Amino acid sequence: MVEPAWLSELRPLIAGPTGNFAQLATVDTDGHPRCRTVVVREIDPDGRLRFTADVSSAKVAQIAAEPRAELCWYLIGAWRQFRLSGRLAVEAGEVQARLWDEMSDATRSQFASRADFIVYGLDVAQVETLDITVRPFARALHEREGLSWTRRAI
């Protein structure tokens, strides 16, 4: 699969030391919006991204009740925003083991045990990009259609 255009634009912008911090929006079990910062651990070439959580986190119940979510990066130095929408799912097995092993001892120590470590994958279906370095601002909508992506200005 060819890497989506939006991901080719995003990768160099998040290459720095804080580039893996993004905001994740979900809804709680009462339907109230919730937003928090997550650490994006990896992004596959097809655009699926992964972050981790502790089983005691409130977002675990929220995601179980409503797996639709949006992840947003606003990259201050680049004056760009990327909003990724899709569905979250727990990923176990090899992916979970590999991400656990790749984390530093200090990061692993934030979990009571390995059993409390959850990996979520966001299956991205739509990405809205915003570039405010140009006038008028440039917005684009990227949508997944099967194994390919379409892009249109909005």
Image (spheres, rainbow, N blue to C red):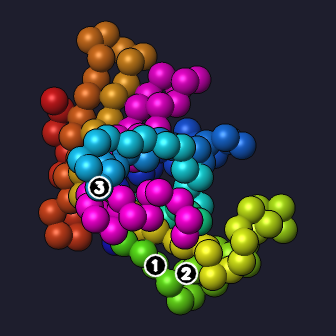
* Residue furthest right as drawn: 105
Q: Amino acid at mark 1?
A: Glu
In the rendered image, residue 71 lying in the magenta stretch gets the answer yes
The residue wearing badge 3 is 29
Mark 3 neighbour density, 10 Å: few (under 14) some (14–19) many (20 or more): some
Q: CA distance from mark 3 to mark 1?
A: 22 Å
Q: CA distance from mark 1 to mark 2?
A: 7 Å
Marks 3 and 1, the one that precedes in the sequence: 3
Task: Indicate the quadrant containing the N terminus: top left, top right, bottom left or bottom right.
Answer: bottom left
Location of residue 114 in the rendering, given as x and y in whole percent from the top left corner: 68, 80
Q: Residue 91: give its label.
A: 1
In the rendered image, residue 63 lying in the magenta stretch gets the answer yes
Q: Amino acid at mark 3?
A: Thr
- For mark 2, give the secondary structure: helix
**Nearer to us in this view, 31 or 78:** 31
Label 1 close to label 2 by CB (< 8 Å): yes
Which residue is at 47% across, 57% downward? 58
Q: CA distance from mark 3 to mark 2?
A: 28 Å
Q: Residue 95: give its label.
A: 2
- For mark 3, give the secondary structure: loop
Location of residue 63 in the rendering, given as x and y in whole percent from the top left corner: 35, 62
Magenta residues span 55-83
Task: Indicate the quadrant containing the C terminus: top left, top right, bottom left or bottom right.
Answer: top left
Mark 2 neighbour density, 10 Å: few (under 14) some (14–19) many (20 or more): some
